[in-house]
Image: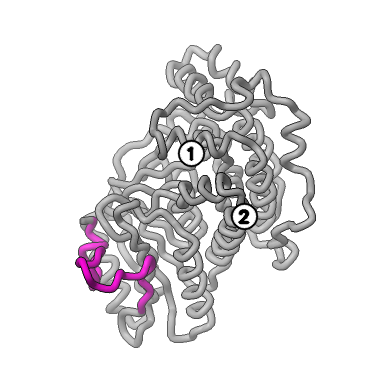
Amino acid sequence: MSPHAADAPYRTGSAPGTTPEPEVLARREGQGGRLGRLTLNRPRSINALTGTMVGLLDAALRDWADDPTVTAVVIDGAGERGLCAGGDIRAIREAVLAGTPERALAFWADEYRLNARIGRFPKPYIAIMDGIVMGGGIGVSAHGGVRVVTERSVLSMPEVGIGFIPDVGGTWLLSHAPGELGTHLALTAARIGAADAITAGLADHFLAADRIPDLLDTLRHAADPAAALAAFDFAADTPPPGRLTTDRAWIDELYRGDKVTEIVAALAASPVPAAAADAAEIGSKCPTSLAVTLRALRAARSMTSLEAALDQEYRLARATLATADLVEGIRAAVVDKDRNPRWSPASLDEVDPAEIDRFFAPVDDELGLAAAQPAAPGR
C-alpha cells in the first residue's frame, strides 16, 4: 500500500456482505475541517475514472470552492499502484459497440468540465501524483496548483496508442511544455518519471514517497493549510535523474515539423539512437490519431485558455467515435491484450488530409467551456 493510502483513515476495499465503499472518498480533515480530502477509490483498476467518480469529484469541488472554512484540497489514490490509470476505456468501447456513443460523449463532457473546474479552483489544489498517473489521471492532477511527484511516479498521455487523442486538457498541457517536449510525449506516448514530469511542466515538486504522510499530517494539523503548504520543505528531496533536460536539444530540433511524416523522417535520419527509437515507437501508434494530435497541439499553442483546448478536444473525441480505430485500439490494449491493433488506415502515408479536417469541423452541440469563462493565464 502506498504511504498516502496507508495513512488515510479508511479501508480500500469492502468485506464480503458489507456495503461497498464509494468510488471517491470525500471528507474534511484537520482543524475545523479546513483540508478537503479526495481519494480515488477503485484500487483494483488503479483508480480508473468512471462517470460516477467524475460526478463525485465535481460535486465536492463545487461545494468546497464556496465554503470559506475549506482552505485547501488534496487528491490522492487508494491502493498500491497509483493515483489514476486513466478513464474507464472499457466502458467507452462498450458504449460504442452497444450503439450508444452518446454515453461516451456524456462522460467526456462531464470529465472535461471537471478538468476546467480543477484548472480554475480558487484554493490550493494539491495532487499527490504517486505511482501511475496516466490519461484521465493527468486530467485530475496536472491542472492543479500544486502537483507532487515521487520516485514511483510514472506519467503518460498514451492515447495515440489506442486510437484516440490526448484529452482531459492534455493538448493544453503538452502544447505549453518547454520547446517540443510536449510533442515528443504526445506522439510517442512515452512514460516519464518525476524529474522529467517537472521538466515538462506536468508537476511542480518532488517528494520521497515515504514523506507523503508527513505532508498530509502537516496540512491536517495546520491552522492554515495553504500557509503550511507554502512553508513545506520540498527542497529536501531530489528526484532520480531524468532524460528530457539532456535530450531537449535534439527533441526541439527534430519534433518541430507540422506533419507527422516530416517528424518521423527527421527522427529516423538522426544519428541519435534515441531519435531512431522514437521514430519506430511513433510508427506503432494509430496514424490518424497521430495526425489529429499534432494538429491539435499546434492549434492549442495559440489558445488563451484551458477551456478552449477542452472544447477542441471534445470536438475531436466526438469525431473519433465515427472511426474504427478507438474500438480497435482499446480491444488490442485491454480486452484481447494482443498489442496488435489493426489501424485504418494502416500507415501515415495513407492518412487523408480531408479526413483530418473532418475532426476539426465545428459541430452543432459544442462543449462551450471557453464561451462560458474569461480567459485564464497559462502556466
Q: Say which quarter of the image contains residue 196.
A: top left
- Residue type at tag 2: Leu
Residue occupying image coordinates x 36% and y 43% = 154
Residue 330's mark?
1
Mark 2–mark 1 contact, CB under 8 Å?
Answer: no
- Say whether residue 19 is magenta: yes
Q: Position of residue 161 (x, y in %)?
A: 50, 34
Which region of the structure is painted magenta?
Answer: 2-27
Q: Label 2, on which residue?
A: 105
The CA distance from mark 2 to mark 1 is: 16 Å
Instruction: Indicate left or right for 358 with 1 as reference.
Output: right
For the image, the number of numbered tags is 2
Picture quarter with the N terminus: bottom left
Residue occupying image coordinates x 55% and y 50% = 95
Does the magenta stretch mainly form a helix, a strand or a loop? loop
In depth, the one of 110 and 90 nearer the eye is 90
Q: Position of residue 52 (x, y in %)?
A: 47, 65
The relative height of residue 349 versus residue 328 in the rendered view (above or below) is above
Instruction: Indicate left or right for 94 with 153 as reference.
Output: right
Picture quarter with the C terminus: bottom right
